[in-house]
Amino acid sequence: MPASFADATAPLVERFNKSQSRIQLSVSRGPLDTDAVSDLAISSLLLGSSPYDLLLMDVTWTPKYAAAGWLEPLEQWLGSGALDDLAPGAELGNAFDGHLWRLPLVADMGLLYWRTDLMPEPPQTPEELVAISQQLQRAGKVRWGYVWQGRQYEGLSCVVVELLQGAGGRWLDQGQPQLNSAAARNVSRWLRDLVILGITPPSVANMTEADALQTFETGDAAFMRNWPYAWAELNRPGSKLAGKVGITTMVGAVGVPHAATQGSWGFSLLSGSGHQSAAIEVLRFLTSAETQTELNRRWGYTPTRLSVFTDPALIAENPVLPELQRALAASVLRPLTPIYAQLSDLLSREFNAVITGEIKADPGMEQLQSNSERLILSSGARG
Amino acid sequence: MSQPSTTSTGKLRLTQVSRRIGAQLLLDQLSLEVEPGEILALLGPSGCGKSTTLRLIAGLDPLSGGAVWLGERNLTPLPPGERRVGMVFQSYALYPHLSVERNLSLGLELRGQNQASIQGELQRVLSLLELEGLRQRRPAELSGGQRQRVALARALLRQPDLFLLDEPMSNLDARLREDLRPELRQLLRSAGVPVIVVTHDQQEAMGLADRIAVLQEGRLQQLDTAEQLYSRPANRFVARFIGTPSINLFSRDGQEIGLRPEHLELARPDAPQAEGWRGLDGQISHQEWLGDRVVVHLTTPGGTTLRVLRPRPAPEGPWQVRWSSDAELHFDPRTGVRIH
Amino acid sequence: MRWRLWLLIAPALALLLALFIAPLLHYLWLSGHAQSVVTGLEPRPVGAQQWLRLLNDGRFWQDAGQTLRFAVCSVGLELILGLAMALLLHQPIRGRAAIRTITLLPWALPTTVMALGWRWIFNDPYGPINQVLQALGLQPVGFLANPALTWLALVWADTWKTTPFVALLLLAGLQTIPEDLYDAARLEGATRWQCLWRITLPLLVPYLLIALLFRLAQALGVFDLIQVLSGGGPAGSTESLALYAYLNAMRFLDFGYSATITLGSFVLLVLLGGIGAVLWRWRPLAGEWR
């Protein structure tokens, strides 16, 4: 698992190992970066006999790994009710092709961070976000209005997914790309306009989560798009913005439900595992309400189980939980397909081109649409 | 441009030339003169300052004191390229990437001389040194002797006012060296300019040069003809450096006596002794063949070792080493200066 | 005794076979098979289909152009700067050994670390360069948000890292040139500039060639620098062939096409080498510089 998860779960793992004597659980601490963890996992899986039993997986990996034949279906172990206790939204992205492949440990969704000290209410629509930003910028309160992830990488695809949903559009519909739609054109035009209007710095074209957080943390921006981890970061003792930040879901068109890109992490059972029943036992323990409560209390990790979200004691400690639960309920998946990585690569590349002004929004979306269609056609895979 | 064989360029004059690097004195106030058409050898063990002297004359290293004159021209302030010096390096310093022809002509090209006149001069030295057939070869494709001739040709081509040669023979085998010596001497003399040859080999110095300057530790020990250096060495160092096998030295009555091995004879102790001759008893310790002659090593009862040069090995038995008093050289034991 | 000769070179042959020829053959086989998530990672023969796809893949050709442009520019710059650096380091100056060690440091740094460092240095607006610009009252520059500037940043970072390597190689070459040659040239009135052009450079040609080949091969395979510094962006403008092949294998799990891209790059490299060799033998260029 990624290093941060390995560190956070270490005390739980120790407790698990002490509580019984049949199973000795050891956690392999991977790199911090999601892609690097993926490289490591894939390298070990390609060798045929992976030394691992369980893999902590990003939501976008599931169809790809399942199609590669590396995962073991979970329903035979956990039964059909395995997802019943999950909070609405958390059940998404665990099943593919009629099987359950993953049980979520930590929920993750795209959030709009806003400055409670600069405005009474967060914006609901793109227009409102622009208007508030410009007003604050003119008043000299902030240097920038809105920072987000515009680098040519997966983060940009996440930004697009929730905006597209909020504009009434879809990435794929019935396996067919819908990127030449009015919604997609509007979203790409809006993102480019943010740069042109000076609401977003031009450096957004190489911005990741960390870069955006850095700008927002300094107090240089009124809004930021980021994941829940930033909440703890912004409210830690000594933070300039402690107590001055609110979270909400991404802006969207009037009358369309707001959306949050889902980015949860969960455990999958590897088909090469030689200790399947023991692994399932560990999986149950690591995704249990008890574990999730502990992880939320100590590390601020967002739970996936409804019972944890609604635990009054936990809410008292962490008042932002209901807001997170609302965002999770609004969460939207990136396309569930084995060729998601290719699709996302095309999308982030094209949107990055629009953001940097390399291509205009409309021809950009036309090109993205035809490239995506060709990819799906040539790969022979269903979208 | 003048023809080297007909015009003299004036004599080379070094006045109290010194070279110092930090606290180290490489050359100490050397003064000497070389006439046009004369060949002077700088002779001494390695590190004696002979190569340093050559580099100072060529202008490759700066002087720490003194001056270098050529005729009426003071060379001291001139950069090497303006001194009109022809130099042959010990390594020959041929440009490995250029053909023989281009090795020779590069200097003239750099000076912007036109191709027609370059070709003319090139032809002259190539035929002089019998290099015509090697024009297109690279240095790596030449024998040692051929390389030396190319280096000479390059120096000659510039029609220099002064010739400097740094160990020109040391890269050749002994046989070739002896064969080439008279040829080289002839060539250098015909240039009609002052010539300095640096060497550590006394035979080479004697074979090539009119006069020899013996250097040690940056100081001039003696500047003289080969004959004078041999028979009237200025001091113990020169006496030991000149002559093979080297001179026998021993103390007697508070003086240091020098006797050359070729001036000693062996006699039976009971044989009569001529007038004005001296003798010392000795035991043969070993004998050393030189090919045509033999060096007999003897030890006297006083513990002195003497080398005697003979045409044949000596038979076993008691011997007395004998010599004429005239052959004795006397040195001041403290300063090493010859007193008689 | 022919077989004895073969016996002697057998270990070297085996190594060559294992390290070079075997992977090449495997890739050749793989390029004729589809092996991806679509086939459940089972190899399925598809003939020349992936090669046709490669020929028609605008992104492959764009990346090839970008990779070549990057390699030629950064290696060219490295040779010029490396030569200047080597000439400087060859001078008898005080503390030369220490200076040599210090100048080599960038080369000792792992590429990813160095790329992260440059990413921060070029950061807009918090990186050191933009801090200085803003302190001077200037607008910060989005170095990594514009294709041309990102490309320059990549060339610069690569040059910064590998110039010391080139300098070291050329320095070794400089040390093989006997001082006598310069003395001889000085006696012939050559200026320092003439010495550089007539002696130093021609004699350095073998070393320049080695540096060129080494660096060109490395630069044409550039991967981690781009992966960290720009991720191939903006808008794919800095993606290299190696990055494209990596994406196909490790992100898309399309091993068949990744092998085709890698082999295609290899073919281009061989063609490039062939053109270079022909030019090298071409009479008008083959003067005394060899």
Image (cartoon, coloured by chain):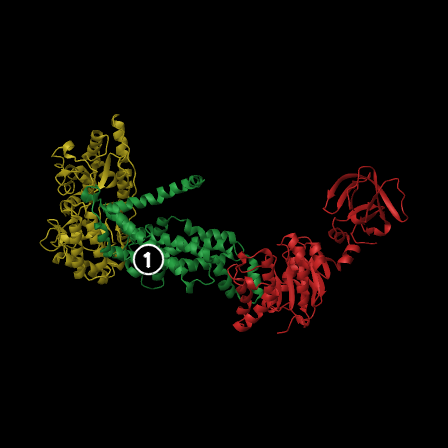
- Hey, what amino acid is under mark 1? Leu
> Quick one: B115 or A126, which is closer to the camera?
B115
Above or below, C13 relative to C79: above
Above or below, C274 relative to B126: above
- Residue A296, can we see it? yes
Classify mark 1: helix, strand or loop: helix
Rendering quarter of residue C220: bottom left
- Toward the left, the furthest residue is A255
Rendering quarter of residue A150: bottom left
Count of numbered badges drawn on the protein? 1
> Quick one: B330 or A80, which is closer to the camera?
B330
Q: Position of residue A44 (x, y in %)?
A: 28, 39
- Toward the top, the furthest residue is A21
Which chain is represented by yellow in the image?
A
- Toward the bottom, the furthest residue is B1
Query: Mark 1 = which residue?
Result: C68
Label 1 neighbour load within 10 Å: few <14, some 14-19, many 20+: many
C284 sits to left or right of A146: right
Above or below, C192 relative to C104: below
- Residue C190, can we see it? no
Q: Chain of mark 1?
A: C
Which chain is represented by green in the image?
C
Q: Quadrant of the N terminus of chain C?
A: top left
Q: Position of residue B126 (x, y in %)?
A: 58, 65
B168 sits to left or right of B95: right
> Quick one: B303 or B201, which is closer to the camera?
B201
Q: Position of residue B230 (x, y in %)?
A: 77, 55
Q: Position of residue A53 (x, y in %)?
A: 24, 34
A164 sits to left or right of A144: left
Which hue belongs to chain B? red
